Image (cartoon, rainbow, N blue to C red):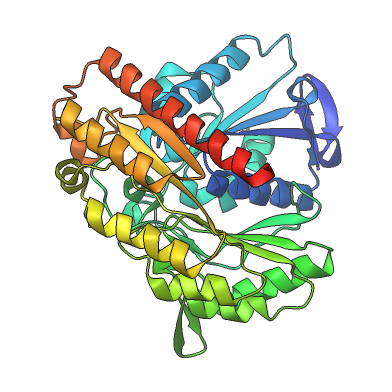
Amino acid sequence: MKTTVNGSRLTAHELKVYIRTFGCQMNTRDSEIVIGMLEEHGYKHTDDPKEADIVIFNTCSVREHAEQRALSALGYLLRRGAKHKKRIFGVMGCVAQHKQEKIFKSLPKLDFICGSSDIYNIPLILSQIINEGKVNVVSVSKKDRGKRSIKNINPSYREKEKEALVNIMYGCNNFCSYCIVPYVRGEEVSRPVKDIVEEITDLVSKDITHITLLGQNVNSYNGKDGKEDIDLIGLLKQLNKIEGIKKISFMTSHPKDAKPSLFKAMRDLNKVDKHLHLAMQSGSDKILKLMNRGYTSAKFIKLVEDFREIVHDGKISTDIIVGFPTETEEDFNQTKEVVEKLRFDNAYIFKYSPRPPAKSSEMADDVLIDVKKRRHSELLELQREISREKKGKKFN
């Protein structure tokens, strides 16, 4: 294939692609898939945006800050495109799925937009732009809110030599009131056990020893093994038998689906990492109900206590949102009390921001930004103190 990029005649294998990833590990895995597909089509991957002919931003819309950071950085590159010899620019991921029309209005020089469920189309999109001269190409599936295909496409590219991310499911059915994921990644769909085992067996043959299983809510995994339904525990048992694997991690777990039976499997399966990421989000029952989380503070505390009783020396981390609509000082103090009681090994703390069309975006964002900042700072410092104390005990 011959084409013109940056004013020069080039063959396909001379075109260099740079992908910048924002957001979660699911996005990281999607970027790996796209890089792998493009390498199979003759493109070259580069980590240097200055030498790239094609620049793709893999975006995340779960947090407003990540979305704005991605679009701002891309706008900067588009404005300086001539200086950096960039000719093809694209956006993929959640922001592309959610805001395709607005993106083209704010970034008219953009060449293409590809939604989360349509990433397998990117080689075709680039071919259309390069060979047919198409502009402003859009590939965004609206069916089932962009439900992801589970076709078994696993290009060989991986970022790390010894570790690999493996999707076991896509999408989410929980509809937490603050969360946009079900709207941009569609409903839950689990990959067949056979496909997951084959992918991991192939990774092991390439000297990968640490596998991280990915899903918006891995606890609700329900894959087929022939005609039999297999849950996360059953999948972990099968993967634990694969020779060559030294460590199996998984994320993210939802408290409403977490059970002591999972904790016992983590204890008993020698290759499964003894770390659980369990997103609390708030210690106030009032706020948890408004968030549509499906559990109370007491149930969450009991889960953590069960985990620590069953998985000795297990590590637990969490997510917390401050400043959710109607959150009072009393609500915030209840969250602080749970953090002080449970003493997480790590916590990711975020300031609430409305994410339409998530349900909470219909509520008044009535917690002042200065109050959100102060609560965020207080909770962050509390967790830092806890983490320092726990690390200090570990080394004493």
Q: Is residue 182 left or right of residue 110?
A: left
Instruction: Name the residue located 34 percent from the left edge and 47 percent from the top edge.
Output: 280
Which of 185 and 305 lies nearest the eye of the viewer? 305
Instruction: Name the residue located 23 percent from the left edge and 38 percent from the top edge.
Output: 334
Q: Position of residue 311 (x, y in %)?
A: 52, 66
Q: Is residue 303 left or right of residue 46?
A: left
Depicted 114 relative to depicted 52: above or below: below
Quadrant location of residue 295? bottom left
Pick out the residue farthest to the front. Answer: 396
Pick out the residue farthest to the bottom. Answer: 227
Q: Is residue 180 visible?
A: no
Quadrant location of residue 325? top left
Q: Is residue 195 left or right of residue 353?
A: right
Q: Position of residue 259 (x, y in %)?
A: 37, 70
User: How many labels, in total?
Assistant: 0
Instruction: Name the residue located 61 percent from the left edge and 72 percent from the top edge.
Output: 196
Q: Is residue 24 visible?
A: yes
Depicted 72 relative to depicted 279: above or below: above
Q: Position of residue 300 (x, y in %)?
A: 30, 56
Depicted 237 relative to depicted 227: above or below: above
Screen quadrant of the N terminus: top right
Q: Position of residue 136 (x, y in %)?
A: 50, 29
Which of 231 and 100 lies nearest the eye of the viewer? 231
Depicted 386 relative to depicted 186: above or below: above
Which of 150 and 114 lies nearest the eye of the viewer? 150
Screen quadrant of the C terminus: top right
